Amino acid sequence: MCTAYEIGKRGGSFPEWGTKDAFEHLMEIEGYTIIRLTLPAPVLLRDGTLRTMRWGFRRLVPGKLKPGWRTIGNSREDKLSGRTWKESFTERRCLIPASAFFEWIDGPAGKVPLRFERPENEWLWIAGIWETDKERGDCFSMITTEPSGAIAPIHDRMPAVLTNAQLRPYLDGELNEFGPSAVPLEWKETANFLKKTSGETKPEQGELF
């Protein structure tokens, strides 16, 4: 469920409590960058500032022979009271700015990504939580919820995309349930950025933020 999203310059409204530096930082982004698990990306905090974090909480999971580390990118709404997510959901909330997110469908030649975005080139604001990892620094997780009508035929979960009116209540701890997003979404098929053909370069994924 949502293992990639895109960050890039957008229009539309910016939260009025966001700092001037945060607004200018997002507006200065050039081009579009695909964000995947463990990569750095900006998140908006309760105080209106942006902070660069890595996507995914790292957890030690049991194995048949020995335990191993796993990066968990998304946190399900119906699991937020569990041990992995509870403390962060209670104490450390954030907003994840995105220009689009991706879901995959099966095509004749393999998986095909669908790119979901808001009409009118506006930002998507996705509910997130964060923690500090001793080795990786600050890390965030994306909350997922029930799908809206645009997503339901494709997947049984979707990112918790918030309306403008939900942003502040979420960060203040007043919004604790999400359900299908009321934000309108448009989608289209796009090139599979997971494949690399001869002479093709991968999307830029460096320390951009």
Image (cartoon, rainbow, N blue to C red):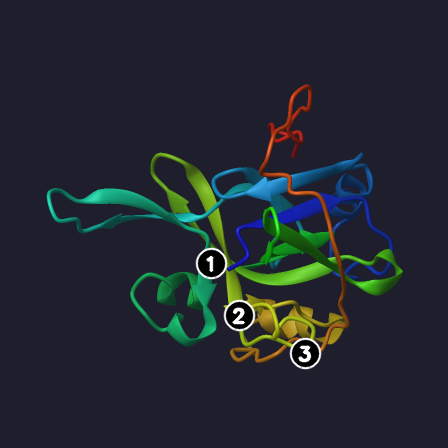
The image quadrant that residue 103 belongs to is bottom right
The crowding category of the residue bearing disc 3, from other C-alpha atoms within 10 Å (few below 14, some 14 to 19, many at least 20), is few
Type of amino acid at the residue the image marks with label 1: Asn
What is the x, y in percent for residue 177?
A: 53, 80
* On screen, residue 14 above or below 174: above
Q: Is residue 30 left or right of residue 109?
A: right
Residue 157 badge:
2
Q: Nearer the viewer, mark 3 or mark 1?
A: 3
Type of amino acid at the residue the image marks with label 2: Arg
Precedes in sequence: disc 3 or disc 1: 1
Q: Nearer the viewer, mark 2 or mark 1?
A: 2
Secondary structure beneath disc 2? loop
**Residue beneath disc 3:** 149
* On screen, residue 7 above or below 207: below
What is the x, y in percent for residue 67?
A: 17, 44
**Residue beneath disc 1:** 74
Secondary structure beneath disc 3? loop
